Amino acid sequence: MTVISRTRPIGITAVSIFAIISGLGEVVVGFKGNYLGILSKDIRPSIATAVIGVFYSLGGLSLEILGRICLVMSGIAPSKGGDAVKIVIGGAISP
């Protein structure tokens, strides 16, 4: 019996989480401006900044989903049966 590791590559997870968190921060900056006081120059709230933040977050989610697809395509994760359904559901609800 062959044991298959079902762990995700740590790099994909780290970059995905960073992109999601950065995107959410950008959304807050878009609505509140320089809310943490870390920018050298104050900026006005802007819907365009918030939209860009949404795209950052969506990019992080997409990267996470692509990472799961890569695991299935390479044979590390199962592509059939109950475990495959768990992978799809997990990819849909968790970053």
Image (tube, grey):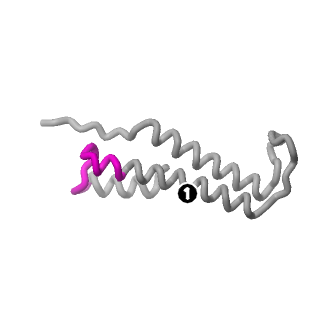
Q: Does residue 81 show up magenta in the picture?
A: yes
Total residue callouts: 1
Q: Which residue is mark 1?
A: 58
Q: Which percent across, then down, holds residue 75?
A: 24, 46
Find the magenta span and give its range.
69-82
Residue shown at 76%/52% (left/top)? Answer: 29
Residue shown at 40%/48% (left/top)? Answer: 67
Work out which quarter of the rendered image holds the N terminus and state it. top left
Q: Depth check: 12 or 89 in front?
A: 12
Residue shown at 85%/52% (left/top)? Answer: 43
For the residue marked with disc 1, what is the amino acid? Leu
Vertically, is 62 above or below 15?
below
Secondary structure at badge 1 equals helix
Q: Which percent across, then down, holds residue 25?
A: 69, 49
- 37 on left or right of 60: right
- 73 on left or right of 90: left
Vertically, is 6 above or below 60?
above
Hey, which quadrant is residue 31 in on the image?
Answer: bottom right
Q: Which percent across, then down, holds residue 27?
A: 70, 55
- 83 on left or right of 54: left
